[in-house]
Amino acid sequence: MSRRWCHKLEVVVLSFVGFTGFLFLLQNDKDGPVLKEAIETSSRILPIITEHPKPVAECRENASVANISGFADLPNHIKNFLRYKHCKEFPLLLDVPEKCGGPDKSYDVFLLLAIKSSPGNYERREIIRKTWGQERTYAGVHIRRLFLSGQVSNAREARKINQLLRIETEENGDILQWDFHDSFFNLTLKQVLFHSWMEARCPGVRFVFNGDDDVFANTDNIIHYLLDVPGAGDQHLFVGQLITNVGPIREKWSKYYVPEQVTTSKSYPSYCGGGGLLMSGYTSRAIYKESLGIELFPIDDVYLGMCLQKAGLTPASHTGIRTVGVRVPSSKLESFDPCYYKELLLVHRFVPYEMLVMWRAIHQQNLICGKRVEVYHRL
């Protein structure tokens, strides 16, 4: 068979397949939405989401940073950070404006769980909803939950994940999503946007838990601790695993690499590890106000330390918050022993199944533990 006839046969076969698919869509979609979606998808140019968050129209790239000495040799993610670090406003894709009671303020939120979660971390969010992140009333106070998210960088993947997040929002009403690329260096941006949202939507929240979606938080203990805090959220409180006397890491291989082009300072202010911390509503508002005048810094927990320092406030240590894991001081006690976790406020890091197992274990009615010293009230 000649090459010319092969080509004609190929055209006929492809045309038949296409027509058959067209008939299938018509037959199986009487109202037309699937057919419409197929046609629109084939003709639509999907938006490109760049490596750095896509800024709003009025926020343009700062091209002048290319003149900084050594800029050309920096990793791409740091170059992009320098180009766009002045961009602090991004549109909300998903919002839950009634989270704190809406206009009528029908209830007071005592503790708001603000959990940083990458868009694709569905399993982690589901486990948290079923365990320590349950929205409930405990010891007479209200606990509410939010997941803070951006967008994935791949346009095709973003389309699927955004549908997932919309479904989660419809079912649970607990996701804030902004139109920026969710990445490690943009965690500070996520933090700033959350405080801005808090100022507008939840100014009356008493306390905020701020942490990652791979921590295990004993919210029962957290509530007991906060109920004993003077001022009921109207005074300064910022506690976690305190980190002091450290500075920027200059090694390029490190996840936390911050070159001199970002900061020439050799030291950071005192701060608490970003895996999980507690703050009062008063302190959250102070952070928001100071963030308006402090440019973004790529390490989110350090940035919070900068805001506190400018506000004249200090972070504090809490022995029940372990953002670098636990070190059990006994060969007879396993590191996953629920009797140990029963006394803590928070531990970083947990995989999803461990959260479920531990939450069930510490709430077992027949859990028998030896004499231990409670630490949920200690600073």
Image: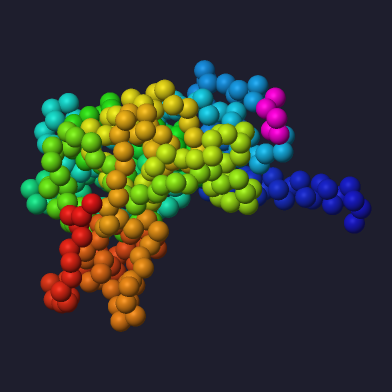
Viewer-proximal residue, 213 or 11? 213
Residue at screen point 76% across, 46% down:
11
Most extreme residue toward the left, as rendered?
140
Most extreme residue toward the bottom, as rendered?
332
Q: Is residue 48 left or right of residue 342?
A: right
The N terminus sits in image quarter: bottom right
Residue at screen point 84% across, 52% down:
6
| Residue 119 sits inside the magenta stretch | no
Viewer-proximal residue, 354 or 257? 257
Most extreme residue toward the right, as rendered?
2
Please provide percent x and percent y for residue 212.
Answer: 38, 50
Residue at screen point 33% across, 25% down:
289
Look at the image and give the residue range highlighted in magenta. Answer: 67-71
Residue at screen point 32% across, 63% down:
355
Please provide percent x and percent y for residue 88.
Answer: 45, 27
Q: Is residue 344 left or right of residue 59?
A: left
Q: Is residue 206 left or right of residue 78?
A: left
